[in-house]
Image (tube, rainbow, N blue to C red):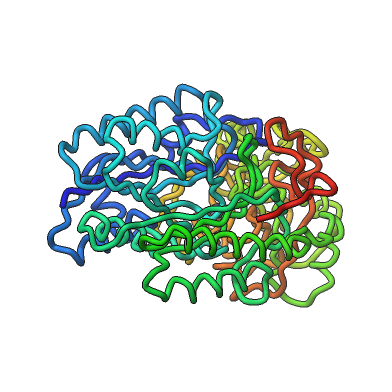
Amino acid sequence: MRIAIGRLWQETDAFNPIPTTLRNFKAMDILYGNEIITQCENVGELGGFIHAAQEEPDVELLPTIRADAWPSGICDRETHQFLKQRLLQELRNTGSLDGILLSLHGAMSATDEYDVEGDLLTAIRDEWGKTIPLVISLDHHANITQRIMTSVTALVGYHTEPHIDMLETGYQAAKILFKTVRGTITPTMGRRKLPMIPQGDLCTTPGHPLAPFFDRIAVLEQTDTVLSACVFPVALVDTPELGWDTVVVTDNDPSLAQGLADDLARGIWEKRLEFLPKRQASPREAVEMALAIDGGPIILADRADATNSGARGDSTAILQALLTTQFQGTALLTIVDPEAVAAAIKVGVNAEIQLAVGGKLFTRNNPPVTVHGRVKRITDGKFTITGPMSQGVNANMGRTAVIEVGNISIIISEIGGPGHDPSLYRSVGLEPRDAKIVVVKSPFGFRAAYESFAQRIIIVDGPGAASSHLESFQYKYAPRPIFPLDANVTFKV
Ligand SMILES: [Zn+2]
């Protein structure tokens, strides 16, 4: 069987004013054709597609395009149209097809289209017809829309937060597609949209409030009838179809699929208060708490400014708190600031420098901070993620400089990068295990790599476009009322 594969992956944070452009996609290298097979064989959902196909000699994969950008603001129109048209053209170039298998994020918005994935899938259906099997994998934070549901034969989302099952998700989606093409299964889907977007503790690991739902899903997926089930806790896109979803795919049993999706949705709604954010430490409190603890490293998770959620990554709040405190040991943190990078490169390695860093683009409660330090290192900002989440992904933060300010090392980069993985610091010669304080720009994903050696983890409540205080954002298009932004939200299945 001839199966086209491809990937378009970007998570949009509608509250980051910096647009995502073609530069962001080119930074992570847009791959075409066989480059995808050779470079992604063991990486992410595409790796899962490839592994699944390797087990089935009659499957021929026809790779099209892989376009990834790290989470950021809304995509501009030109970039969106280029990627959409290029993916469609690459699909055409594959010739006759028995099925289409795509890895999508599910929460990508562009200035000309709030539902990039739904629009793309609709275009594929229009051209390739209603019957060709079309299966997609999605990020856990996808925003499921009507157009996605009516276009796909089946969909599979991640089952983990931190996301450590990208390859397995791709594998599961591929197997569903291959069986559908053979006619051994007939996927049917049920879905329930919830009027809720809380952004508290959403880990799926034991002890966290989403864990029991994924335990239930694991049991369901062991049955022959349930092909896939998922919960999608979205929040930071702003669309008329915003809201968490449950989606269940069964083998030729639509009423079971709908019943299970409804059951999951009902259970989640009943526990909605558990998904609200707990009180978090202010940047000042977080630094004081960290310094009161013996040993290290103490991980300060700057979740509001998380580049992993699409925030800008230029918050100065923790830096300010560190600069006003004397402490033993070292602190590592990152700030996105292309102007400061250019200034550091201009003076060169080992030069002393006075710089205003951060706070230039996302300015609310976030002024630039002037530091006096030494340029320790300059790199191209490229590295490979080695931790369990996004393992093997080639990241690119643009030109990057390490500025040493006393015992604080500030990694200044042109664009945001994977804020969850120690490989970011290691790529510039810094070892998080040896530091007293390590700032990570990730709400949950950092736990996958850092939890095993962190002395303590402190969630920080700073400014930023990924704050869990959703009431601080101006949602323009989201359906109202919605929990927790409004009182008296009702939900009935
Ligand atoms: Zn996600």
The residue most toward the front is 255
Residue 437 position by quadrant: bottom right
Residue at image coords 54%, 48%: 142
Q: Is residue 201 above or below residue 337?
A: below
Q: Residue 445 location, x and y as percent?
A: 58, 61
- Seen at 31% across and 49% down, the residue is 101
Q: Is residue 21 visible?
A: yes
**Towards the viewer: 317 or 347:** 317
The structure residue drawn at horizontal position 80% and vertical position 35%, both measured from the top left corner, is: 364
Point out the residue furthest to the left here: 58
Q: Residue at x 33, y 35 (%)?
A: 124
| Left or right of residue 474: residue 382 | left
**Among the 4 quarters of the image, the one containing residue 278:** bottom right
Q: Residue 164: where, in percent of width, then height? A: 48, 65
Task: Please state if 474 lies on the left or on the right of 75 as rendered.
Answer: right
Left or right position of 12 against 93: right
Pick the front one: 316 or 73: 73
Image quadrant occupied by the C terminus: bottom right
Q: Position of residue 13 (x, y in %)?
A: 62, 40
Foreground residue among 187 and 230: 187
Q: Number of numbered discs present?
A: 0
Q: Residue 346 in the image: state x and y as whole percent.
A: 57, 31
In this view, the residue in front, 137 or 400, is 137
Can residue 317 be spotted in the picture? no
